[in-house]
Image (cartoon, helix red, strand yellow):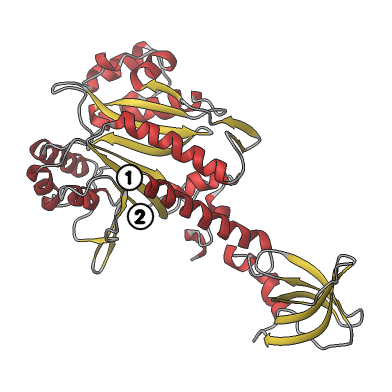
Amino acid sequence: MKQNKEQILKGRIIEYNAIAKTGILKTEDTVLPFALGKKTAITVGSIVSLQGKQSMGNFQATMVKKLKEPELNFEEWWNKNAKNWQKGVTDPSRVRLIKQKATLAQTTRDFFSQKKFTEVFTPLLNSVPGMEPFLDPIKTSEGWLITSPEYNIKKLLATGIGDVFEITKSFRGHEENSPYHNAEFTILEWYRSFADYTQVMYDLEQLVLTLNQSLGHGTKLNYNHIAIDLKTPWLRLKVNDACKKWAHLDLNKCQTIDQFKKAIKTAKLNIDIDKIDDWNDLFYSVFLNYLEPQFPKNKPIIIYDYPLPQGALAKRKSKTSFWTERFEFYLGGIEIGNCFSELTNGQEQQDRFEEEQKIRNKIGKEVFPLDNDLIEALKIGLPPTSGIAIGLDRLFMLLLGLSDLREYLDFPTNQV
């Protein structure tokens, strides 16, 4: 008969009954009941080492070593504190979540390493922020926090480094505190040299499948009580086809704001066009109210070929085309990532930045200087390149079956 050898367990006492000499020990990511062989004074919240044996579902401790007692009343502290990191002190599921996120991040790095991508590390603090008209960069005394690492990664692409990826933090001011938004977030970007957006679509499908399979879920993902089928190839739909299908609009005939307003009126869409003076605002009104709600929840969808005003950093389909090689992908009806076949013409990029400066000025936002280093990198020359940005917090949250970033993050903005 195999003898039950003594073990040493280390963790925190989260419950203890001195009379019954029983309690609960929380180790890294589990809890287990224990019983002591003799009466021992232990303060709840203490970190201890227990030596003993497993018996009948309990750990029978023959020796207790106190490693650290709390410097405050642990039970009072616990009752009045409910931040996510604080929950992890007694709740092993929070610790398991931290470890699951670390595993997914490592699986992501392994995925790109196996494809011979180079991991790069670009700064969080820049002297020139992103130019996107509808984003609000966060200013510090030393510069601007990045809204995306894209500009700096493109400078590295000019060196001829080849395929690259980066996992980093990004920041956006005035970001609503909601289930899908946080002012600070984790972003994954990868770029393929000598490639276009169709090759990145394939990378994306394989990455999401690999991550889901690493959790033991195969090709099925359960999110918000919906079974999502991740089998490839994923559904693909052009933006204009979606507009025709669900909003009864042909954006080829809506290239000016007057044409767009007339078409919206003809289609009898419930949009107050008299209060909108910007083409992009009209597009968002149509997209968010008539297209996005129709995207399937039970399968991923790639929405591709966006109109030129929506593709400031994207390559046109042809030299004079109104359409750009851009796609977004949705999982469970939630937007997760955004991809371009990258614009590599330095002069055209400068012209688009200057147009964005005009838009920022028109809508009353601070107008930023051009990132001349980026324009210079493009003029030196980038190979044909496609890149994508993914909200990694959102993706991991969905894969882990959670539905609110405020629950998923260890330090959501409203708790720091």
Residue 48 as seen in the image, left or right of residue 381 = right
Determine the image quadrant of residue 338.
top left
- Give coordinates of residue 16: x percent, y percent: 82, 77
- Taking the spot 47% from the left edge, 55% from the top edge, the residue there is 106
Hey, what amino acid is under mark 1? Trp
- Give coordinates of residue 351: x percent, y percent: 11, 37
Q: Please name whichever residue, 352 or 232, is drawn nearer the observer in this view of the structure.
A: 232
Relative height, residue 149 to residue 12 (above, below): above
Determine the image quadrant of residue 10.
bottom right
- How far apart are labels 2 and 1 at the CA level? 15 Å
- Give coordinates of residue 122: x percent, y percent: 27, 58
Hey, what amino acid is under mark 2? Ser
Q: Secondary structure at mark 1?
A: strand
Which tag is nearer the camera, tag 2 or tag 1? 1
- Taking the spot 29% from the left edge, 56% from the top edge, the residue there is 120
Residue 375 as seen in the image, left or right of residue 71 = left
Closer to the chain start, of discs 2 and 1, is: 2
Residue 26 as seen in the image, left or right of residue 309 = right
Relative height, residue 87 to residue 249 (above, below): below
Q: Secondary structure at mark 2?
A: strand
Q: Residue furthest top?
A: 266
Check disc 2 and report the residue beneath it. 170
Quick check: can you spot residue 121? yes
Image quadrant holding the N terminus, namely: bottom right
Label 2: how many residues lie within 10 Å, few (<14), some (14-19) or many (20+)? Answer: many
Quick check: can you spot residue 275? no
Q: Residue furthest front?
A: 1
Residue 245 as seen in the image, left or right of residue 133 = right
Per the rendering, the mark at residue 190 is: 1
- Give coordinates of residue 412: x percent, y percent: 50, 59
Label 1: how many residues lie within 10 Å, few (<14), some (14-19) or many (20+)? Answer: many
